[in-house]
Image (tube, rainbow, N blue to C red):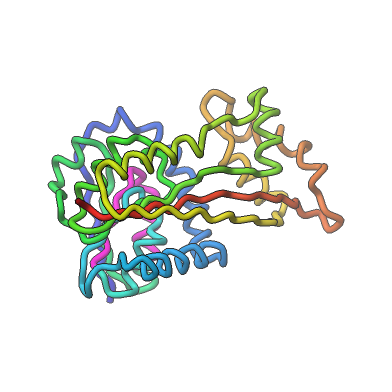
Amino acid sequence: MSNVRVTNIHEDEAAWRAERDAWNNRSEFFVELHEKQERTAQVTHFIDFLKKHDLLPAPGGRTLDVGCGVGDYSLGIAKLGYQATGIDLSNGMIAGARLIAEKEDLDLDLYVGPWSEETRAELGWEKQFDLSYSFFCPVMFDMNNIEALTKTSRNACLFVGFAGRQDTIVDALYEHFYGKKDDFKWQANVDDVIAKVNQIGRDVQVEYVNVPETEYFTEEEALRYFTMRLHSEEWGTEEAMKAEILPLLAPYRTEDGRIRNTSEDKIAWVSWRVK
């Protein structure tokens, strides 16, 4: 029988409520994504990467997943017998992680709270874990958070993040709604992470993986997915965005009525040891 423990961090919600609510709105999507082939393949690659670089802790070791979402990677670690801990500011994501862990009969320690100085001071996690890592977590482009991640580990750390994103429909819709191309500097931010870990860590390893993908959505799935990717408070309601997206999907419809989208992500895998 699984043993899932959830701890809420008592911190002023006002500073991070909007971000928490945004991720809460996406949590159902990520619960559904957990069992899809692309996600299970990512978790398999994660475990293979750890083995390749000798980053797995000794049997029974402790691991920390910052920005754990619904716990995909924490659960992958837990299946190997490690003491897996995850933290995420979204209580919706943590609820999803708990649901999945109980369904798969796995143990997890889960924390609801932002990756902030106040949270870290309350938890006292300095050098408490054998492996600390983070996947696709936006706050990790803040170098203070990379340094804080490193301090939690007594051995190894891993950062995985986008170094580039190309998405046919998302790019077209972004330009439609916001009047410009998305100019987020993915590679420049990854370069900053690499420079930082070279300062504070040792045995730094950097690998890039290009992931091309062709996806087919039903109309309902497409509206849900692209609204999730694009919606922000500066652009009306989600329902209004969906209504405007619908006719814009016409060029991407296949003969059977599905929506075809192509994408290619460049993903950086950066690992290091604690000095």
What residue is at 67 percent from the left and 48 percent from the top?
222
In the displayed image of the protein, which residue is found farthest to the right?
255
Q: Is residue 22 left or right of residue 246?
A: left
Q: Can you say whether 163 is above or below 33 in the image? A: above
Residue 215, position in %: x, y?
A: 68, 56
- Asked whether 177 or 82 is in front, the reply is 82
Residue 196, position in %: x, y?
A: 32, 39
Q: Can you say whether 268 is above or below 76 in the image? A: above
Quarter of the figure with residue 79: bottom left
Q: Is residue 243 left or right of residue 25?
A: right
- Asked whether 240 or 140 is in front, the reply is 140
What residue is at 82 percent from the left and 42 percent from the top?
251
Q: Which residues are magenta?
A: 83-101
Residue 172, position in %: x, y?
A: 71, 35
Q: Is residue 147 left or right of residue 244?
A: left
* Quadrant including the N terminus: bottom left
Residue 159, position in %: x, y?
A: 37, 50
What residue is at 21 percent from the left and 68 percent from the top?
61
What residue is at 38 percent from the left and 55 percent from the top?
205
The answer to whether one can see residue 94 in this image is no
Quarter of the figure with residue 141: top left
Q: Can you say whether 78 is above or below 125 in the image? A: below
- Asked whether 150 or 253 is in front, the reply is 150
Whether 78 is among the magenta residues is: no
